[in-house]
Image (tube, rainbow, N blue to C red):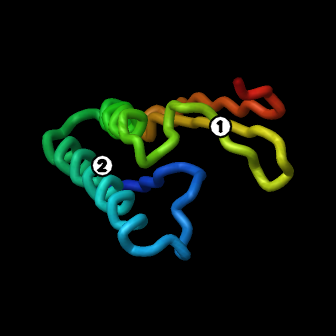
Amino acid sequence: MGWAIALHGGPGNISVTIPPEGRQPREADLRHCLDISVDALKSQKHALVIVELVVRELENNPNFNAGKGSILINAGTVEMEACIMDGNTKRCGARLLQGSKVF
């Protein structure tokens, strides 16, 4: 069985209406994260290690809000969720936080 990578920068302001000069840096940063993950997979690093590596990269990137908190959803409330799964064991952990006050 091969592998696949799903990567996104989280909710926020990456709209198709943003001019290319605003969109291209974000897309380049996502490509950088993709390259990191592909290189790690080729080095046979464990998938969970790679997930943590890429999440840390996104958390340290000013173009994304990973690790910074939450944004308002369409209903006007705060919602934050996260999930990680080990594909071999099918063990996972998930967390959803709703309605919290953001300071």
| Residue 4 image point, x, y percent | 36, 57
State how far apart marks 2 and 1 are (Cα). 21 Å
> Is 66 displayed left or right of 70 in the figure?
left
Label 1, on which residue? Answer: 70
Q: Nearer the viewer, residue 58 or 87?
A: 58
Image quadrant containing the C terminus? top right
Q: Secondary structure at mark 2?
A: helix
Circle 2 packing at 10 Å, graded few (<14), some (14-19), many (20+), is: many
Image quadrant containing the N terminus? bottom left
| Residue 101 versus residue 86 in the image, above or below | above
Q: Callout 2, which amino acid?
A: Cys
Q: Nearer the viewer, residue 83 or 81?
A: 81
Question: Residue 55 falls in which quadrant of the image?
Answer: top left
Q: Residue furthest left?
A: 43
Q: Residue at x 79, y 27 (%)?
A: 100
| Residue 60 image point, x, y percent | 36, 34
Q: Is residue 4 visible?
A: no
Number of callouts: 2
Label 2, on which residue? Answer: 33
Circle 1 packing at 10 Å, graded few (<14), some (14-19), many (20+), is: many
**Mark 2 or 1 closer to N-term?**
2
| Residue 29 image point, x, y percent | 31, 53
Q: Residue at x 29, y 53 (%)?
A: 34
Q: Callout 1, which amino acid?
A: Ser
> Is 13 displayed left or right of 71 in the figure?
left
Q: Residue at x 31, y 34 (%)?
A: 53
Q: Residue at x 50, y 71 (%)?
A: 18
| Residue 42 image point, x, y percent | 16, 47
